Amino acid sequence: MKAILIVATTALMLGGCQSGSKSTAKAAPGMLNATCPFSDQPVGEGAPSSDWDGETVGFCCAGCAMRWDAWTDEQKNNYVIAQQ
């Protein structure tokens, strides 16, 4: 059971969600971004999110949120600045 959990977690961290076509969706209330930084999938209300530098960054799935956690502070800062 432990091995299955490790494999599933690793797959989410490395693969995240499948990339799709760029959405033209608007950001959910309180979110900095309308699409996931990793997959370009829409980010809606209740989506996984992370607070960074006073902004709430949304993700399409928990796997992408874990990928965000692995980014350096510089990568996170650059993303937030680019979205403003």
Image: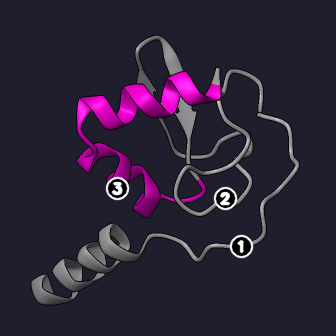
Name which residue lies at 71% across and 73% down: 20
Name which residue lies at 45% across and 70% down: 16
Answer with left or right where residue 31 lies relative to residue 29: left
Instruction: Kindly state the secondary structure of the residue where label 3 is placed.
Output: helix
Q: Disc 1 marks which amino acid?
A: Gly
Question: Is residue 81 in the magenta section?
Answer: yes
Q: Disc 2 marks which amino acid?
A: Asp
Instruction: Please name the residue that numbered disc 3 is placed on.
Output: 67
Above or below residue 68? Residue 84 is: above
Which portion, as a residue range, is magenta? 60-83
Compare residues 53 and 22 and report the one nearer the observer: 22
Answer with left or right where residue 33 lies relative to residue 79: right
Q: Earlier in the sequence, mark 3 or mark 2?
A: 2
Q: Earlier in the sequence, mark 3 or mark 1?
A: 1
Instruction: Please name the residue that numbered disc 2 is placed on.
Output: 40
Label placed on residue 20: 1
Answer with left or right where residue 11 lies relative to residue 36: left
How far apart marks 3 and 1 lie (CA) works out to: 17 Å
